[in-house]
């Protein structure tokens, strides 16, 4: 929290915040440590005078806050604001009637088809693989998560995995467009077409078709199990990866583990009109609730990406630089990075670094 | 893979050396495979000869042929040999992508009902990877799940792939996992699933695992989501012991674990079937680019053969051969190209044979 001294605290040597209207962003804290992480984001934004106003909704399937009206309210808000920040809405294992969880339904209703996870090594925190820079693009509306299951005979359950040409093409185009925009050189499609010949074969074919429209970008494909093995042996051979739903879940988490865990990787979900910013590896982390040990890095970096998306370039850099500086200095580290600090310590350190930016 | 306790638990066959009547020869069906298969198979046969193991090899080919009724099947002489000997050792087989006949591996699985794929992953001393002290076993259900091969084109551009989970298969694999844990002095079994998304299918798998766990109170049973396992596996693989899971997750995770210890070139694997049939195999590809050039690394097939010897109760031979192999790798003087040296396959084999003869 900012403490005003007797004299003016002139920490704004750089241009002050714009006088334009503030941006409204929907915020869904979710379950587990979601609320704590969102509090961290709000604190940092307040300290940095970021012109963003949050509209909060507490939607949850496990905390008795589930209701259709709440879901509709969240959807309306998201459709108005077009940008949202989200924590993980935990899916309980027992289901009452509907097989699709709230998360899946949100994704489908807003058609958030692309999930982008940025896997970047943090400077100052070394893991077994350093200087990683991957982007993982995952189709997240169809595939194995179609929630179409039935018991055909007692004791035999069928679960359908749906792959369509249209959605495969869409995600492939998104991947190549993203690669072009960010100046990336290679897109690798991940699949299991040697076993699931029709389904993943269709996905692969769609990717190959779209690849021909982008001659400047190198296109490769790799089988999922080989991809996992290569990621732990030599992850530097990959640049942008694109894949269907389930493989995306696996590779997201694998890659997050390579650079430091679920607490340091930001991610976002895009549809044609909306953008939702969240962590890369989505876990509610229920064991940490109330213990003040969660690492807010992922959420803060994602918030910074959101600010960039809103064209608030200055504030975006301010937040991300502060976070990276704290990690690089290494004095304040949460438990998952091997330190002993609490979430609030970390947030305080980030706020400190926001104020004392080196003039450049 | 030194299961010294396994040695003690199997006490049926006691081999007494020097002068007493040698155990009668046991037949093993050898399937050399394609690509580098024949080279590494002959390497293994040479090493077994040097160790004077009581194994008689029966070589068979398993290229798919069309049987009566138009169904693809393996040649009848191969089937008859396996049914008789019950133990098989297989080299790599080609799996064509989108060819006319199903993959040979799948065919073998269906013919002999090989329901469990066991892959012990232990860090090899002398072959350094960023991950040390890995010691886990992945047990994968091998007959159903996502690899049922049931796919349909619903309309042009929409493909549906069916994942099948049955009570019987889930119970069978869970029982095998716990039996294996008990016989090999393992402390815990972890079920890997995605029951939060595929609530009915993976839910059934999980329920069966829980039921079977009730009968094995001496083994600790935990359950973990697939993405959490991936996340934790690349950060700290020592926390895992025995992992049991359905087909697709098993495929991915077993390759991931193979990557942790050094790749498919050094990973053994065994397939256990109903009726006491067991086929041990090397899981790497056929490597057509180095076939016939005497550059292949026979370690994977050799370690699988060692696993086979242990399964048959011939622990002495198994340990002898394994020690010779590990000592050769640790010495680093004669290594094949993929292990970082530049010796030929035949030189590597000769070195191991020499060590075995020195030990006798």
Image (cartoon, rainbow, N blue to C red):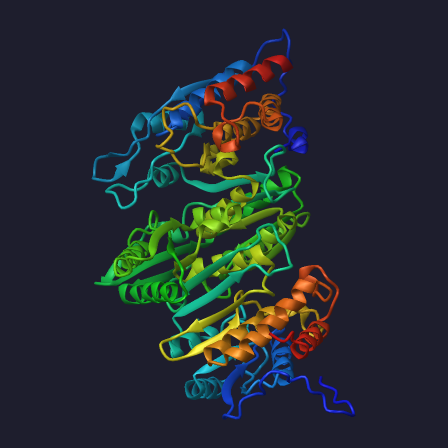
Residue A59 as seen in the image, left or right of residue A116: right
The quarter holding residue A2 reads bottom right
Quadrant location, the C terminus of chain A: bottom right
- Residue at (62% x, 55% y) in the render: B222
**Which residue, as the protein is rendered here, is positioned at the far right?**
A6
The quadrant the N terminus of chain A occupies is bottom right
Q: Residue furthest front?
A: A360
Residue A323 screen position, x and y as percent: 63, 70
Residue B205, relative to residue A292: is it above or below? above
Residue situated in front as seen by the camera: A191 or B360: A191
- Residue nearest the observer in this picture, A223 or B5: A223
Q: Is residue A309 above or below residue A116?
A: below
Task: Examine the rendering and report whether any part of residue B292 can be seen.
Answer: yes
Across and down, in percent, residue B81 comes to 38, 24
Looking at the image, how many numbered discs can be counted on the residues? 0
> Does residue A196 lie above or below A19 as drawn?
above
Residue A101 coordinates in the image, percent (x, y): 47, 73
Q: Residue at x 61, y 33 (%)?
A: B1
* Res. A250 visible in picture: no
Placement of B277 over or under A352, stated as above or below: above
In the rendered image, the residue lying farthest to the top is: B19
Residue A320 locus on image (x, y percent): 58, 72
Q: Which of the 4 image quadrants contains residue B293? A: top left
Q: Residue at x 38, y 71 (%)?
A: A113
Q: Is residue A270 left or right of residue A48?
A: left
Say which of A352 and A279 sits in front: A352
Closer to the camera, B278 or B197?
B197
């Amino acid at each position: 929290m900012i403490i005003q001294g007797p004299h003016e605290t002139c920490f704004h040597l750089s241009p002050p915040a714009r006088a334009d209207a503030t941006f409204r962003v929907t915020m869904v804290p979710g379950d587990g440590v979601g609320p704590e992480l969102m509090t961290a984001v709000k604190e940092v934004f307040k300290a940095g005078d970021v012109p963003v106003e949050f509209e909060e909704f507490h939607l949850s399937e496990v905390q008795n806050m589930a209701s259709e009206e709440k879901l509709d309210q969240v959807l309306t808000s998201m459709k108005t604001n077009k940008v949202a920040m989200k924590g993980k809405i935990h899916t309980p294992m027992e289901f009452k009637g509907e097989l699709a969880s709230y998360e899946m339904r949100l994704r489908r209703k807003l058609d958030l088809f692309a999930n982008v996870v940025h896997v970047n090594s943090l400077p100052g925190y070394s893991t077994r693989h350093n200087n990683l820079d991957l982007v993982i693009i995952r189709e997240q509306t169809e595939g194995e998560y179609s929630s179409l299951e039935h018991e055909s005979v007692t004791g035999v359950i069928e679960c359908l995995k749906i792959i369509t040409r249209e959605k495969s093409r869409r995600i492939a185009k998104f991947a190549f467009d993203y690669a072009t925009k960010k100046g990336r050189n290679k897109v690798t499609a991940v699949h299991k077409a040697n076993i699931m010949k029709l389904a993943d074969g269709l996905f692969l074919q769609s990717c190959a078709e779209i690849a021909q429209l982008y001659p400047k970008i190198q296109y490769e494909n790799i089988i999922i199990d080989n991809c996992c093995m290569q990621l732990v042996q030599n992850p530097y051979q990959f640049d942008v990866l694109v894949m269907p739903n389930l493989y995306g879940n696996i590779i997201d988490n694998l890659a997050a583990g390579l650079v430091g865990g679920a607490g340091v990787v930001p991610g976002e979900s895009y549809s044609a009109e909306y953008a939702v910013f969240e962590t890369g590896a989505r876990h509610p982390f229920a064991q940490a609730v109330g213990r003040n040990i969660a690492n807010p890095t992922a959420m803060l970096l994602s918030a910074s990406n959101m600010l960039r998306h809103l064209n608030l370039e200055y504030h975006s850099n301010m937040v991300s630089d502060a976070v990276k500086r704290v990690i690089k200095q290494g004095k304040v580290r949460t438990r998952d990075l091997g330190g002993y600090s609490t979430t609030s310590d970390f947030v305080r350190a980030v706020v400190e670094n926001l104020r004392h930016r080196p003039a450049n | 893979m030194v299961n010294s306790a396994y040695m003690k638990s199997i006490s049926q066959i006691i081999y007494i050396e020097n002068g007493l009547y040698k155990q009668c020869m046991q037949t093993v069906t050898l399937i050399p495979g394609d690509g580098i298969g024949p080279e590494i198979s002959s390497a293994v046969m040479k090493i077994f000869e040097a160790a004077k193991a009581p194994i008689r090899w029966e070589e068979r080919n398993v290229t798919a042929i069309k049987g009566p009724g138009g169904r693809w099947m393996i040649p009848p002489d191969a089937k008859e040999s396996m049914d008789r000997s019950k133990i098989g050792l297989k080299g790599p087989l080609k799996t064509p992508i989108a060819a006319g006949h199903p993959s040979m591996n799948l065919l073998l699985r269906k013919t002999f009902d090989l329901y469990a794929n066991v892959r012990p992953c232990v860090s090899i001393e002398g072959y350094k990877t960023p991950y040390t002290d890995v010691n886990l076993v992945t047990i994968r259900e091998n007959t159903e799940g996502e690899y049922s091969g049931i796919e349909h084109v619903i309309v042009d551009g929409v493909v549906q792939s069916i994942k099948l989970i049955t009570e019987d298969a889930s119970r069978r694999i869970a029982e095998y996992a716990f039996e294996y844990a008990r016989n090999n002095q393992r402390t815990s079994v972890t079920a890997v699933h995605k029951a939060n998304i595929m609530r009915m299918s993976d839910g059934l798998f999980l329920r069966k695992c829980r039921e079977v766990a009730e009968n094995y109170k001496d083994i600790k049973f935990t359950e973990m989501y697939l993405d959490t396992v991936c996340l934790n596996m690349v950060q700290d693989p020592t926390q895992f012991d025995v992992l049991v899971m359905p087909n697709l997750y098993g495929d991915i995770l077993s390759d991931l674990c193979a990557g942790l210890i050094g790749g498919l070139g050094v990973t053994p694997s065994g397939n256990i079937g109903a009726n006491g049939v067991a086929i041990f195999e090397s899981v790497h590809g056929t490597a057509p680019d180095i076939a016939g050039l005497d550059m292949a690394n026979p370690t994977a097939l050799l370690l699988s053969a060692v696993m086979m010897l242990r399964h048959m109760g011939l622990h002495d031979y198994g340990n002898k051969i394994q020690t010779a192999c590990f000592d050769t790798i640790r010495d680093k003087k004669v290594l094949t190209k993929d292990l970082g040296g530049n010796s030929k396959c035949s030189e590597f084999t000769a070195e191991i044979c020499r060590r075995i003869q020195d030990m006798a």
